Image (cartoon, grey):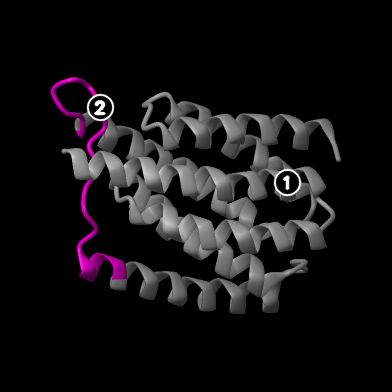
Amino acid sequence: MSWLEIIAVAVSFLGIWLTARRQLLCWPVNLAACALYFKLFLDVRLYSDMVLQALFGLAILYGWSVWARGRNAIGEVVVNPMPPMRAVAGLAAGTAGALAIGWTTSRYTDAALPWMDSALSSFSLVAQYWTARRHAASWLLWIVVDVLYVGMFVIKELWLTAGLYAAMVGLAVTGYRRWQRSRRES
């Protein structure tokens, strides 16, 4: 456990909590968390997750702009239904990305857990895109991904980060419930 990990955990938790509450402030907080975790993952050789943080940075800028335009008359972020074909396309893209990244990192790097790291990174991008598009279903994918991340971080002995991801499972359940309730009410 390092100071970098402690700070990254605190900032990440705050960012996810703000996201679950549909607060626009979640985007700059999550951007800071990405920068912190980029450095941490570089240090522990989780290269797919390091690259994921850079891609998350771009996705966060996209999500921030989408959410800024996707508010109702009283300023709340509007939750959108997930079109079935978007769900299928997202899961297919996640699978293709996992295979491509996994093959590349297992063959050309000294990545610690190339296949697991790649799959989780790829599906995290799908979940992030769905979050940016304001789909409550994003939280269901986050739950699955975060549960698996807990195991990976335990293997890498990133105990605080494993704890963060365990807490993020709870936040994802809360986010899903809140977003579903908001969707029903609108």
Left or right position of 4 against 36: right
Q: Earlier in the sequence, mark 1 or mark 2?
A: 2
Quarter the N terminus occupies: top right
Disc 1 crowd rating (10 Å Cα; few below 14, some 14-19, many 20+) is: some
Q: Which residues are magenta?
A: 70-87
The residue under the point 76% across, 37% down is: 5
Q: Compared to 63, does 141 lie above or below?
A: below
Which of 82 and 94 lies nearest the eye of the viewer? 82
Question: Tag on residue 163?
Answer: 1
The residue under the point 76% across, 33% down is: 6
Task: Based on the picture, tell me whether residue 81 belongs to the magenta stretch.
Answer: yes
Left or right position of 43 against 81: right
Left or right position of 82 against 146: left
Q: Compared to 26, does 120 lie above or below?
A: below
Q: Compared to 133, does 11 lie above or below?
A: above
Question: Tag on residue 76?
Answer: 2
| Quarter where residue 149 is shown | bottom right
Which of 5 and 57 lies nearest the eye of the viewer? 5
